[in-house]
Image: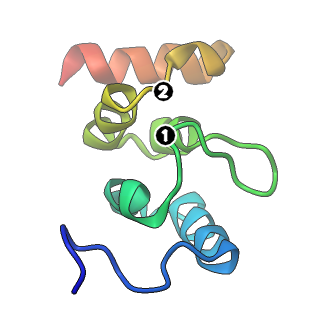
């Protein structure tokens, strides 16, 4: 029996890559499944782009706050993306 919505076999590398790719393609709601899939809040996609950066790009404030509460930092972002993300967090 799985707990807290964890899915059997979800921790395989292929599944992690699939999850990261789906987040990079705009499914930032899947960030909340990172813990049950074995991904850390500071995980990056195959191109080296962090989850928090994708969430900032798509403007998903809830996902950004979730990642920050689980150990991610905005210091990994740079320039315009950092300003945009901070603006989202301050205005919502």
- Point out which mark residue 41 bears: 1
Pointer 1 or 2: first along the chain: 1
- Point out which mark residue 72 bears: 2
Seen in the picture, residue 21 relative to 90 is either above or below; the reply is below
In what element is the residue under mark 1?
loop
Q: Position of residue 76 (x, y in %)?
A: 64, 20
Q: Position of residue 6 (x, y in %)?
A: 30, 73
Q: Decide: few, some or many residues near mark 2? Use Cα within 10 Å; few <14, some 14-19, many ≥20.
A: some
Residue at left offset 40%, top offset 86%: 8
Residue at left offset 50%, top offset 59%: 38
Identify the image quadrant of residue 67: top left
Seen in the picture, residue 40 relative to 90 is either above or below; the reply is below
Q: Position of residue 21 (x, y in %)?
A: 63, 67
* Left or right, residue 47 beside residue 43: right
Pick the front one: 16 or 54? 16
Identify the image quadrant of residue 2: bottom left
Residue at left offset 68%, top offset 72%: 13
Circles 1 and 2, Cβ within 8 Å, touching? The answer is yes
Seen in the picture, residue 84 relative to 40 is either above or below; the reply is above
CA–CA distance between discs 1 and 2?
6 Å
Residue at left offset 81%, top offset 51%: 47
Residue at the farthest right position: 47
């Amino acid at each position: 029996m799985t707990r807290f919505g964890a899915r059997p076999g979800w921790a395989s590398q292929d599944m992690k890559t699939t999850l990261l790719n789906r987040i990079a393609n705009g499914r930032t709601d899947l960030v909340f499944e990172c813990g049950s899939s074995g991904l850390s809040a500071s995980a990056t996609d195959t191109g080296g782009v962090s989850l928090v950066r994708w969430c900032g790009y798509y403007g998903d404030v809830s996902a950004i706050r979730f990642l920050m509460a689980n150990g991610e930092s905005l210091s990994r972002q740079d320039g315009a993306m950092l300003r945009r993300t901070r603006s989202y967090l301050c205005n919502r």
